[in-house]
Image: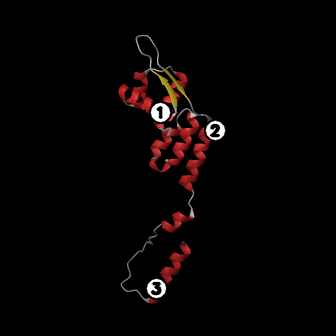
Amino acid sequence: MEVNERVFKMYLYLKENSFDCNQVADLLGITSRQLTRLLGKWQDEGILSYTSGSGRGNASELHFNINVEQEFINYFLKNFHKYDIPAIQDILNYDMSDSARKVLRICIDENLYSKDEETYQRAYYTDYLYRIPRTFTLLKIWMWRWLLFLLI
């Protein structure tokens, strides 16, 4: 069960609006037929309950079976590395609870601004040389290695 951005956008829209297949499809940027398929998939996964309003004047009903905001945060944190900065900014601008926004900001800050030991071990360091020396002596090579060792 993955509560991705589409489910979250639909959830936010339906908090303030009634369900209309065409409007929700336009919001998600898909056709109403694709939305019907997605609704069936999400219903099979247990994310929501959907009853299609068959006939004229019968409204469709949609209810969420899970805490969509919490599940979306979990999905986002698992897939954080797939998002670029503008997409992250768009997600932070969604109308979500303050606690959810705070959790997202903390996790984003930790992922963007902290470095773990694995990152340092996998990183490649290139030193900038103002000029390339014509000859290398053993002493110069040893000094460069010592300098790189101190920087790492």
Q: Are the residues at dot 1 and dot 3 in contact (C-beta closer than 8 Å)?
A: no
The disc at residue 44 is: 1
Marking on residue 99: 2
Which quarter of the rendering shows the C terminus?
bottom right
Q: For residue 104, which quarter of the picture?
A: top right
Q: Is residue 10 above or below residue 75?
A: above
Judged from the image, the secondary structure of the residue bearing numbered disc 2 is helix
The nearer-to-camera label among 2 and 3 is: 2
Q: Position of residue 88 (x, y in %)?
A: 49, 43
Residue sitting nearer the eye, 130 or 30: 30
Q: Is residue 75 above or below residue 8?
A: below
Amino acid bearing label 2 = Ser
- The residue drawn where x is 46% and y is 85% is 140
Mark 1: give few (<14), some (14-19) or many (20+) Cα within 10 Å: few
Q: Position of residue 112 (x, y in %)?
A: 53, 53
Residue 23 x/y as whole percent? 42, 23
- Element type where label 3 sits in the image: helix
Q: Tell me the residue at 58%/45% (across/down).
A: 105
Is 73 on the left-hand or right-hand side of 58?
right
Q: Picture quarter containing residue 52? A: top left
- First in residue order: circle 1 vs circle 3: 1
Give me the disc on residue 140. Answer: 3
- Give amino acid for label 1: Asp
**Real-space Cα separation, disc 1 to disc 2, in angstroms:** 29 Å
The residue drawn where x is 58% and y is 52% is: 110
Q: Mark 3 and mark 2 in contact (Cβ < 8 Å)?
A: no
> Residue 64: x percent and y percent?
54, 28
| Sequence-first tag of 1 and 2 | 1
Query: Who is closer to the viewer here, 92 or 46?
Result: 46
Asked if the residue under mark 2 is in contact with the one under mark 1, i.e. CB atoms within 8 Å, the reply is no
